[in-house]
Image (cartoon, rainbow, N blue to C red):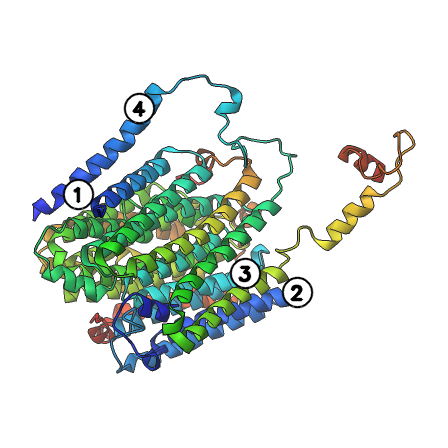
Amino acid sequence: MRTPISYFLLMSVLLFTIGTVGVLVRKNALVIFMSVELQLNAVNLALVAFSRQHGNLTGQVLAFFSMVVAAAEVVVGLAIIVSLYRKRRSANVDDASLLRG
Amino acid sequence: MLSVLGQVSGGPAVAHGKLLFRPIGPELILVGVALAVMLLDAGYPERHHATLALLSLAGLAAAAAYSLSLWSWTGPTTVLGGMVAADRFTVFFRLVILGVAALAVLLSYQYLERADEVRGEYYPLLLFATAGMTLITAAADLIVVFLALEVLSLSLYLLTGFSFRRLASAEASMKYFLLGAFSSAFFLYGIALAYGATGTTNLAGIAHGLTGQVGPLSLALAASGLLAVGFGFKVAAVPFHMWAPDAYQGAPTCVTAFMSAGTKVAAFAAFLRVFDVAFSPLIWDWKPFVWILAALTMVVGSVLAIAQSDVKRMLAYSSVAHAGFILVGVTAASHAGIQAAMFYLAVYPAMILGAFGVVMVVSGRGERGLTLSSYAGLARRSPLVAAVLALLLLSLAGIPPTAGFIAKVAVFTAAIQSGHWPLALVGVLASVVAAFFYLRVIVLMYMQEPVIAGGQREAETGFDAEPGAVGSLGFVAIAVPALLTLIFGVFPGILFGVLKSASIIRF
Amino acid sequence: MTTGYVPILILAAMAGAFAVLSLAASALLRPKHPLPAKSAPYECGIEPIRLPQSERFPVKFYVVAMLFIIFDIETIFLFPWAVAFRSLGLFGLVEMIVFIGLVFVAYVYVWQKGGLEWEKPEQARRELSARFVPLPPSVERSPGDRITREPAAVESGAG
């Protein structure tokens, strides 16, 4: 029996929501970043599910691209977070309070 | 890669000989030059700042010339398997973005020299960001929109944190990055749902799929909402604007000038193409959302700008407010609306880039003298710079005879024609509020004495009254935008004549 | 028109409820025996707390990890090409050569910038020579322990 597409979608929405909540409530820049990665993976799940539903490969191709983009984001993001951490000795976003107004 | 994608994704079977790379020529030039600059810097690490800047300028000029030649493109409207559009809309925005980038290179050269931040990675990053911006204006497929958006965003995150020794820059970069990545996730989810609703990521295919659909449109509606959130982040529309003031304030001023102008143009070009065309079958569903977004953005941006005492932060909020005015044109969603938004997007970059350019020139070396009070009596110390800033601020405020006035009139007229007169009213009121803080700076410059005694003033602002301190490159980079706002303010017909054919979006 | 929104709302409500419920359930049901080790955010990686300013931060690992991720993930594009290798033919080959050429440019850049060196040559030489200075007489020595001193002793010994 084929698993209905709605199961995958529900799973994907749940993962995406957990990621969104994670971004909004967590304070550590690295954890926030991990939550964003969770969101991107939720999208990949949805893309692959839709790809199967529609029977074309666009979704899977887009999932490839989103994985590569996610990797590029990891690299850029880690570089930024590490360089700030070296200066400030903290990865807590609440400590980043120099810019206010 | 794009062409392989066209093959794999089951697009129309294109014979290999028929792949037309010409319409993405400008991007290929930009990326090629960026790689060349990168390798040049890696291979010859000694200081040769001028060479790198000149090479980048040459690349931008070549890309602009190539774009111009695409104005008379008579081939198919989309190429590379329906991935990239080749219309005059794209040519128009490409030229605007390339102009912004060229002026940004001039500003950057001076900034990096004076702040002693010369590192070879700067120009490749700037060129990659420019390539992303120009590619997004040509994107006829959501995959390309996403990739171009990421190319420009990732480069800009790094440019924002380019002076990483300065804590504010590193901090701005982290905030921009976290919120930008967050918004990218929303954007990508929107793409996934649009694909789920229609079975394609091609914009023409989406428009076609939505027109024929009779069943429930939940997926497509959610998709348009998520895409609007993603674009809202990129153009800094309220309530998705939180990153903008921090990123604009912390970034090196030349980067602020570049991204405040370039990102907005690029993101709005894609916004227009995706919403006013691909999602036009759902126009009555997304319109209320964008309507509210526009109204909130104009009001909140203008009101919050009043409370700022830092010039860069004030201009950042003003750029948020301007995103709202452009959104009015998007909301109108008519041909006149698109035309008005495009006019706005041609003159707004000139105004904001020029204004940040003046801020950079006035702060001298690095990031000094950014408080409003350091602008007191600027007219006496440096009349020319003060006059340029005054002209740009008048244009930002939308006071005739500047281009800012024409742009505002155009978007409000388009909104009224489409029956959105309450939105136009909100816009006019917001402009009145906004005029206050622009005029306050002009009053400071012309009618007040410098607050600090003579000897300390120079140390405080880092800027002395001698004309040589402005720097000829910096002066060119602020005088050109000021002239443009004046020219397009007095003779708006020049631009509208071009827009007549450029505002037709085809794919 | 409005009926289209109902499934979205239901889905959003379900997703939100799931997130809230699962967090609440785990908070209520789990045993609570907090220990310092358990309260630490990670079992590995950086501690997200303030460290003394003098603490050194080995950034080399991050650089290697970043380079690994970025070059590793590029191979993703080789897989679809491998699947469609025959049908794409010479054209696909040329495209992939261009792609790998671009990755190679990045590699050359990293190489030239010294991103692949664990430590810079002159730095290595300096550290090496610092390790092999004669030990002060007060330190007991046995054969072969010339490089086993505490870092502090190196500083005072090397002068």
Front label number (4 vs 1): 4
How far apart are the two marked residues, 2 and 1, measured between alpha carbons?
Answer: 58 Å
Report the Cα–Cα distance between label 3 and label 4. 50 Å
Q: Residue C25, labelled with which disc?
A: 4
Crowd band around label 1 with a 10 angstrom C-alpha radius: few (<14), some (14–19), many (20+): some
Q: Amino acid at mark 3?
A: Glu
Residue B484: where, in percent of width, then height? 34, 69
- Mark 2 and mark 4: span between their CA atoms? 61 Å
Which residue sits at x=52%, y=60%?
B122
Quarter of the rendering occupied by the C terminus of chain A: top left
Local crowd size for mark 2, using a 10 Å CA cut-off: few (<14), some (14–19), many (≥20): few
Q: Which residue is mark 1?
A: C8
Res C34 seen here: yes
Q: Is residue B245 left or right of residue B367?
A: left
Q: Secondary structure at mark 4?
A: helix
Chain identifier of the residue bearing label 1 in the image: C
Q: Nearer the viewer, mark 3 or mark 4?
A: 4
Mark 2 or 1, which is nearer the eye? 1
- Give the labeled residue for mark 2: B46
Front label number (1 vs 3): 1
3 and 4 marks on the same chain: no
Q: Position of residue B501 (x, y in %)?
A: 21, 75
**Label 4 CA crowd tier, 10 Å (few <14, some 14–19, many 20+):** few
Cβ atoms under marks 3 and 2 closer than 8 Å: no
Which kind of residue does numbered mark 4 sit on? Ala
Labelled pair 2, 4 in contact (Cβ < 8 Å): no
Residue drawn at x 40%, y 70% is C85
The amino acid sitting under disc 1 is Ile
The mark nearer the N terminus, 3 or 2, is 2
State left or right for residue B378 relative to residue B343. right
- Are discs 4 and 1 less than 8 Å apart at CB? no
Q: Is residue C89 above or below residue C20?
A: below
